[in-house]
Image (spheres, grey):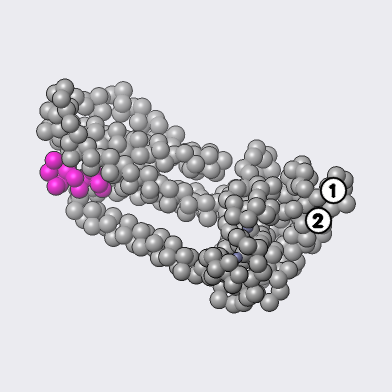
């Protein structure tokens, strides 16, 4: 394998983190037609053993799968399912493509029965591992996007998805034309992502404090130690998305709600991992909601944020389109995420489409000068009611452990 081939495989693999079939399709197209493309700089060659890769059947199949992939990625309900396991599909496709483009010297190895693994193959496996890691990071990023716009009523997901399609198509074409330039750009981008991940990890570890009683390392926002249950004297506040703040907690009761809202254990501040109302902390076994009473108090806490958001979104509503987008994003983080993060993605197709439809109508109405300003708060309020209702319904069916059999008393909480 030449260095140029190694670079080309590395660059090609980088795009498999975004799509499973599209990069394979474009690569196969290039492999088939590159002799007739001017300035084509590809060093990858198809050998008799891998002719199938550029054959009609494979090209047509990859073309159809790429189309389905591009469409599926625009539909949030499909994407949310795909994002869970597509990293394995992607690294599988990456490795298949790499091996389909084996250089002549490796085919010689494959054809002999006493074949060992060549450096070429090691490199392919290494790059596929990289795809797995990158696809995982990508899934994490989209998780944040879904929190903000899960029904794609603002089109945030579609816009990102569209740019990702472009990134893959242009990227792979550039790999063939100017591989070294793409290689340097990818190295810089990945290096930056890696450093940011490492930095965050280190920061979180460094911030741990020592329990005054048992001397174990515990979270600085914990109200009590997860090992010995000793009370923590001065816990630190936690932000809406779960980041530790520099300020000390002044109201311990309020801090309980803030921890639950940040999806952390209300006692030891360990992250809660499941999208369920009924779950227990992995460190201290405490459930986020011990019973309907706690659910009720939590709803009261989230309700208390509604008036502020109504004021802010009405003011933002004076700015056409951008004001609508901003207020919906803000309301999703502050009002809807507190409920949604405890609900599993189930079939709510009708309400999803209904909310999306409403989002469209209210965005159109919002453009009307002055009167349009009430459009964002009305839309936000309707979606808020929807998610709160879903949350209450789910809590009622989960049988939380406080013996409240009859919960009709909490079926409605007006903010
Ligand atoms: Zn302790
Ligand atoms: Zn805990």
Secondary structure category for the residue under label 1? loop
Q: Is residue 365 above or below residue 56?
A: below
- Say which residue label 1 marks: 404
Residue 273 in picture, x, y percent from top left:
58, 50
| Any part of residue 204 in sight | yes
Q: Nearer the viewer, residue 144 or 204?
A: 204
* Label at residue 293: 2
Q: Is residue 392 left or right of residue 68?
A: right
**Ligand 2 sits in which quadrant?**
bottom right
Q: Residue at x 17, y 36 (%)?
A: 118
- Give the class, few, some or many, for how many residues have Cα within 10 Å of label 1's Cα (few <14, many ≥20): few
The C terminus, quarter of image? bottom right
| Any part of residue 342 in sight | no
**Are discs 1 and 2 less than 8 Å apart at CB?**
yes
Residue 55 figure quarter: top left
Mark closest to the chain's N terminus, 1 or 2 = 2
Q: Residue at x 25, y 37 (%)?
A: 98
Magenta-span inclusion, residue 7: yes
Magenta-span inclusion, residue 343: no
Q: Is residue 305 left or right of residue 170?
A: right
Secondary structure category for the residue under label 2? helix
Q: Is residue 251 above or below residue 300?
A: below
Q: CA distance from mark 1 to mark 2?
A: 8 Å
Residue 8 figure quarter: top left
* Label at residue 269: none
Q: Nearer the viewer, residue 121 or 341?
A: 121
Residue 77 in picture, x, y percent from top left:
56, 40
- The segment highlighted magenta reads 1-11
Residue 310 in picture, x, y percent from top left:
71, 66
């Amino acid at each position: 394998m030449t260095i140029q081939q190694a670079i080309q495989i590395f660059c090609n693999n980088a795009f498999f983190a975004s799509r499973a079939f599209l990069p394979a399709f474009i690569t196969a197209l290039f492999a088939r037609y590159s002799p007739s493309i001017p300035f084509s700089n590809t060093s990858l060659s198809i050998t008799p053993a891998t002719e199938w890769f550029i054959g009609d059947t494979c090209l047509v199949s990859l073309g159809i799968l790429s189309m389905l992939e591009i469409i599926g990625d625009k539909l949030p309900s499909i994407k949310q399912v795909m994002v869970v396991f597509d990293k394995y599909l992607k690294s599988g496709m990456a490795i298949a493509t790499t091996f389909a483009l084996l250089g002549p010297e490796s085919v010689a190895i494959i054809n002999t029965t006493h074949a060992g693994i060549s450096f070429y193959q090691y490199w392919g496996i290494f790059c596929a591992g990289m795809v797995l890691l990158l696809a995982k990071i990508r899934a994490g990023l989209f998780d944040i996007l879904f929190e903000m716009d899960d029904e794609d009523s603002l089109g945030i997901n579609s816009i990102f998805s569209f740019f990702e399609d472009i990134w893959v198509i242009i990227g792979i074409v550039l790999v063939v034309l100017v591989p070294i330039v793409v290689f340097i750009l990818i190295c810089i981008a990945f290096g930056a992502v890696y450093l940011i991940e490492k930095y965050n990890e280190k920061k979180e570890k460094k911030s741990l404090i020592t329990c005054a009683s048992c001397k174990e390392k515990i979270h600085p926002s914990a109200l009590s130690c997860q090992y010995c249950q000793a009370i923590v004297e001065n816990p630190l506040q936690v932000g809406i998305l779960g980041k530790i703040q520099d300020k000390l907690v002044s109201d311990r009761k309020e801090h309980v709600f803030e921890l639950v809202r940040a999806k952390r254990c209300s006692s030891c501040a360990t992250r809660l991992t499941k999208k369920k109302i009924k779950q227990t902390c992995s460190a201290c076994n405490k459930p986020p909601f011990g019973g309907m009473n706690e659910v009720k108090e939590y709803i009261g806490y989230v309700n208390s944020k509604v008036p502020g958001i109504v004021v802010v979104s009405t003011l933002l509503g004076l700015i056409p389109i951008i004001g609508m987008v901003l207020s919906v994003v803000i309301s999703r983080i502050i009002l809807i995420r507190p409920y949604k993060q405890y609900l599993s993605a189930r079939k709510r197709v009708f309400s999803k489409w209904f909310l999306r439809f409403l989002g469209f109508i209210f965005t159109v109405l919002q453009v009307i000068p002055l009167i349009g300003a009430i459009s964002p708060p009305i839309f936000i309020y309707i979606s808020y009611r929807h998610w709160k209702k879903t949350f209450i319904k789910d809590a009622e069916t989960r049988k939380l452990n406080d013996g409240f059999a009859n919960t009709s008393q909490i079926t409605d909480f007006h903010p």
